[in-house]
Amino acid sequence: MAFESFGTMRVNEVGHLEIGGVDTLKLAQKYGTPLYVYDVALIKERARGFKKTFEELGVKAQVAYASKAFSAIAIYQLMQEEGLSLDVVSGGELYTAMQAGFPAERIHFHGNNKTRHEMEMAIEYSIGCIVIDNFYEIELLAEILREKEASVSVLIRVTPGIEAHTHDYILTGQDDSKFGFGLTNGQAEDAIKRVLAIDDFQLIGLHCHIGSQIFETTGFKLAAHRIMEQLVIWRDGLGFHADVLNLGGGFGVRYTADDQPLPPSQYVREIIADVREVAMANNLDMPEIWIEPGRSLVGEAGTTLYTIGSRKEVPEIRSYVAVDGGMSDNIRPSLYEAKYDAVIAERPLEEPAETVSIAGKCCESGDMLIWDLPLPKSDAGEVLAVFCTGAYGYSMANNYNRIPRAAVVFVENGEDKLVVARETYENLVQLDLPLH
């Protein structure tokens, strides 16, 4: 493959891959591999770009980091410094956010099956908003609020019946989804009526999310248009005014040269144009717009470094090159058939001499990171850099085969900072209890 850089990536004076002004070989030597490396400058650029677009359009907005993409104290603190809000989907993410000192009033809690304990945590922490996903949650949350003599701001998640052109596993906006209240089948209107009847709820608006890794604006625009038209009906019929319209995330990023995502600002500008059009045509107040970028903030900023190990030649079929990680640190190729590009960090500009398939070390035939990757002839001990692993790499990491999870390093302006330590074998057994 031709070397295509992300963010601050470059080839330095000695011919090595460099990120954030730091030689990746030095990072591999200092911290070991596998190693997740995050380009902090690129994350900041993306965060500021989203915020600037709303400011230029004169639209009141919140940009909330969808933290399921990568959750850790350091990334939460970075997003706080950039003035973003935070989207969490579990008690663990919420707890991590509070440990990071993230302002509770800028936290939004999602999920299709929030437990009583998680909802109680959210109320005790006085977070900014809970996104109600189903009728069960309406009753459970109302009961908790009565017990605690509390109130909370809520959004109702609706599924607008829009199918995004993306992998079937990550479609969420269509009618047949585990998420949200259907817009076309009347469930969303029923939910609004029930929530409006409960004094402890402050219904501030609606939420929708049509999918992930989307490369065109059509789905977003259709969803926004459809919800805005419905808001006109609900204003006239129910007296319901939405102060907030949360249009979710799902903006695509470039994993390989085949991916052609739009600039993040284009998604925002076209969505806002549709919202404004319906609002102005119907004398409807322009709602505050919330979005939830996750992958598009951190995906391209992450690179995983591996050490090359064994090689297997299958004559006239393929060459397998194995690395010291795999589905334990990046399950997406096995789960989604996700595609990635990679280079040898010592010599990223060298012309390919062969086509190999990158195998993981897990005892699983499906543990393949990249099929048919053009590379220079590689040797054991060299470092392979796999691009665009910043989203859903560490957050979906696992201990299959009792492999410790990798470390995470932030790099910026020539400095490196360890933000998640590498797991040890001792960590792996610390929760185990003996039989006798």
Image (cartoon, rainbow, N blue to C red):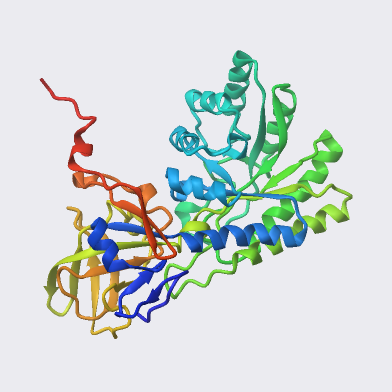
Q: Quadrant of residue 417?
A: bottom left
Q: Residue 196: horizontal and vertical position, in percent? A: 74, 28
Tell which of 397 and 364 is nearer to you.
397
Q: Quadrant of residue 315?
A: bottom left
Side of 377 where 212 appears, left or right? right
Image quadrant for the N terminus?
bottom left
In this rendering, is residue 91 above or below 17? above
Image quadrant for the C terminus?
top left
Residue located at (41% from left, 71% from top): 9
Among all residues in the image, which is located at the extreme left?
Answer: 436
In this rendering, is residue 89 above or below 387? above
Tell which of 414 and 277 is nearer to you.
414
Residue located at (36% from left, 50% from top): 394
Q: Residue 191: horizontal and vertical position, in percent? A: 68, 32
In this rendering, is residue 182 above or below 224? above
Q: Quadrant of residue 270?
A: bottom right
Side of 285 where 62 appears, left or right? left
Q: Residue 233: horizontal and vertical position, in percent? A: 82, 43
Tell which of 176 and 322 is nearer to you.
322
